[in-house]
Image (cartoon, rainbow, N blue to C red):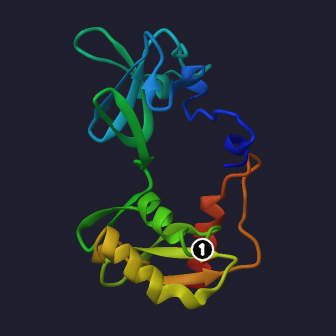
């Protein structure tokens, strides 16, 4: 918002190291780049793809796949859609749990919860009845659980409602600045 107010035109990019950085701008793939959805996962093809992972042929074979037409695709690990040529990323496919027999995207739950708790991170925790359930971890107030549960139920459904809030002094972070989800899950398990 500040950049726009100063006259700049921000552009949202999407890509990764394996795609030589951003290859989708404001939802539109660059010329020569194709994006498709296979089994709910975004895949990218084009001249910008890496050859593979150094000294790791198994990981390369699992991540870079060739279809029946001979096109080589990078499996991003991201969930999303491509509608009328526009790419939308909805979260990570590995950040989905089964709660009460229903697939629940923790990324979607986190997006809703962050309207109430901007620093919230949502992780999975075992649950006796549901199998797994979302848990909110925040440095903010734990007093908004019922409001968060109602908002998530309204947007996604009952199986996605967070079970509890774990309030901590600081959110553990990776060197990249992203939340350290593994460390956060350990905090939730210890709180259990």
Q: Is residue 74 visible?
A: yes
All told, the count of numbered labels is: 1
SS at badge 1: loop
Could you tell me which residue is drawn at 60 percent across and 19 percent down? Answer: 20
Residue 14 placement (x, y as % from top left): 53, 32
Q: Nearer the viewer, residue 122 or 150?
A: 150
Could you tell me which residue is drawn at 44 percent across and 62 percent down? Answer: 106
Q: In the rendered view of the protein, which quadrant contains the C terminus?
A: bottom right
Residue 2's place in the image compared with 61, above or below, is below
Residue 27's place in the image compared with 145, above or below, is above
Could you tell me which residue is drawn at 60 percent across and 87 percent down? Answer: 142
Residue 127 placement (x, y as % from top left): 39, 80
Residue 115 placement (x, y as % from top left): 53, 69
Left or right: 54 as drawn, with respect to 127 = right
Residue 25's place in the image compared with 148, above or below, is above
Left or right: 37 as drawn, with respect to 189 = left
Residue 32's place in the image compared with 10, above or below, is above
Q: Is residue 132 visible?
A: no
Q: Nearer the viewer, residue 175 or 1?
A: 1
Crowd around label 1: few <14 · some 14–19 · many ≥20 (10 Å): many
Query: In which quarter of the view is residue 100 placed?
Result: bottom left
Residue 94 placement (x, y as % from top left): 43, 50
Q: Which residue is mark 1?
A: 117
């Amino acid at each position: 918002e500040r950049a726009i107010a100063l006259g700049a035109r921000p552009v949202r990019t999407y890509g990764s190291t394996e795609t030589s950085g951003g290859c989708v701008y404001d939802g539109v793939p660059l010329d020569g780049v194709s994006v498709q959805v296979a089994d709910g996962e975004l895949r990218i093809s084009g001249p910008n793809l890496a050859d593979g992972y150094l000294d790791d042929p198994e990981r390369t074979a699992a991540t870079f796949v060739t279809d029946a037409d001979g096109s080589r695709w990078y499996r991003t690990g991201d969930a999303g859609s491509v509608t009328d040529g526009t790419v939308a990323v909805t979260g990570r496919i590995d950040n989905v749990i089964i709660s009460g027999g229903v697939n629940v995207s923790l990324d979607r739950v986190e997006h809703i919860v962050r309207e109430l708790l901007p620093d919230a991170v949502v992780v999975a925790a075992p649950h006796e009845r549901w199998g797994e359930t979302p848990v909110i971890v925040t440095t903010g107030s734990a007093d908004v659980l019922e409001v968060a549960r109602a908002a998530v139920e309204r947007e996604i459904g009952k199986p996605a409602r967070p079970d509890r809030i774990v309030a901590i002094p600081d959110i553990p972070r990776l060197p990249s600045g992203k939340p350290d989800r593994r460390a956060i899950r350990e905090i939730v398990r210890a709180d259990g």
